[in-house]
Amino acid sequence: MNQPLTSRYWLALAAPKAAPAVATSTVLILGRIWNANGAGHSVGNAALMVVLATGSAAAGAFAARSGDSLIAGTAFATSGSLALAGVAGYADGLSLPLLLWALATAVAYGIAARHWRTDRREITAHERHMDERREEHAHVERVEALRAGAQIEVAREGAAYATALAQALIHREALPGFDPAALTRAGLPVLPAVEITKE
């Protein structure tokens, strides 16, 4: 019963880690398919890929200068992908495309690792903040529970004191020589006040 959930959880964790390799491998495969369909040693196709890669790199530079890191990263990634696809499509052998694929994969993992570290830091900071808030709320709850317990204890003691006082008066009345006027003149003992505060 738990197996599908476990495998789904594992896949959800592994998918982002495999994304850079899948992306660069897809570009390499598409470049080699393009090579098999006539792009090998085609100057026109190579020129097209150079123009597209250069245009993407220029767009990335402008975006980086304007401060938009998301567009800049996307443009530079597109430029690298176009360059890799162009080399994979133009070259005869497989050694140069594989070398560029390994280099592109390493760069992609380097950039992704930086983002993963940032995400991990943010998640850790959020969890730490939530733990602090939970601890703070637990402390407030403990203080309120202690205060309520103290108020209940004072009320209980007051009730016990009033019961003992009433029983003492009843027993006193039964004794010979009891004078209620003298008791009134002396005054009854004062019951402890119970303060109930609402917050």
Image (cartoon, rainbow, N blue to C red):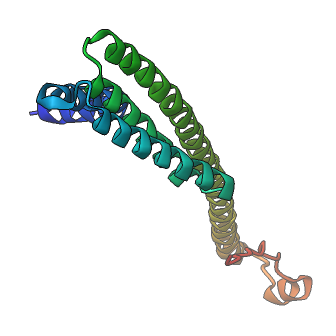
- The front one of 24 and 119 is 24
Identity of the residue furthest to the front in this view:
43
On the question of residue 194 being in view, the answer is yes
Position of 18 compared to 134: left or right?
A: left
- Residue 163: x and y in percent read 63, 70
Q: Residue at x 53, y 40 (%)?
A: 119
Position of 170 compared to 24: left or right?
A: right
Q: Residue at x 37, y 38 (%)?
A: 47
Q: Residue at x 18, y 36 (%)?
A: 5
- Residue 15: x and y in percent read 29, 33
On the question of residue 143 being in view, the answer is no
Identity of the residue furthest to the left in this view:
1
Position of 179 compared to 48: left or right?
A: right
* Vertical comparison of 122 with 164: above or below: above
- Residue 112: x and y in percent read 48, 33
* Vertical comparison of 77 with 102: above or below: below
Q: Quadrant of the N terminus?
A: top left
* Vertical comparison of 35 with 172: above or below: above
- The front one of 154 and 13 is 13
Q: Residue at x 20, y 25 (%)?
A: 32
- Residue 124: x and y in percent read 57, 38
